[in-house]
Amino acid sequence: MKKLFLASIALLGLNANAQEENKGLEGTFWVAGQLAFSTTDNGVSETKSNTIVPVVGYFIAPTTTIGLGVGVINSTTTTNLGGATTDESSAVIIQPLVRKYWGIGGKFFFFGQASLPLTFGEDKLSSDKTSTVGLDVAPGFDFIVNKWMTVETSFSLINVTSTTRNPNVGDSTSDFSFNANPFDLNPGSRSVGGLRLGVKFLF
């Protein structure tokens, strides 16, 4: 009877471990985002821009996560002679996303991500306003470094964008764009379009 009792305890332990493994990252929060600063000088004018978009996510299932990014994009162009501002813009971006993972061996995972970036911008000099609604489908790879950090890379495979411009003077205009080519076809360049590389922190 004692042996039977011990065997039952062992089976319960194995079942609990199996359920824990099947749970994957379900219930785990993560943070990532985009942080970029750049300066471009063409000899006549200088453009400074910055992008700050933190992203917070949550695994709703063992291999499925949702996230939300909220941030700002700013750009200012000044002349090299006199320092007069010729262009200045600011935009707020809100980007919900969903991502699905598939294991490909060891700590490597392949994922597919769909995001819906919403951008609301304003030209600071003319007060013209621009709003953009997009759909971006991006595959990528994720490598688990340890229990609290991963390294990932992805690129834009399909991108659909609808933009509406509301000028301070005149009628509003809109346009629609669709891009399903992930490669830059310019001569001498075969870089993957929109290649992103970064880290994700788990907690």
Image: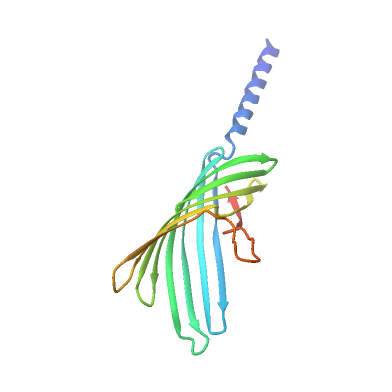
In the picture shown, does residue 46 fall above or below 159? below
Residue in the picture at 36% in, 62% down: 174
Q: Specify the quadrant of the image occupied by residue 108.
A: top right
Residue in the picture at 59% in, 51% down: 201
Is 186 positioned to the left or the right of 177 in the image? right
Residue in the picture at 58% in, 54% down: 155
User: How far across and how far down the image is residue 27, in percent?
Assistant: 53, 40
Question: 30 or 50: nearer the eye?
Answer: 50
Question: 72 or 31: nearer the eye?
Answer: 72
User: How far across and how far down the image is residue 111, in percent?
Assistant: 58, 45
How many marks overall? 0
Is 128 positioned to the left or the right of 154 in the image? left
User: How far across and how far down the image is residue 56, in percent?
Assistant: 50, 52
Residue in the picture at 55% in, 45% down: 112
Q: Residue furthest bottom?
A: 82
Q: Which quadrant is the N terminus positioned in?
A: top right
In the picture shown, does residue 72 fall above or below 41? above
In the picture shown, does residue 146 fall above or below 88? above
Q: Residue furthest top?
A: 1
Is 44 positioned to the left or the right of 85 in the image? right
User: How far across and how far down the image is residue 196, in percent?
Assistant: 59, 57
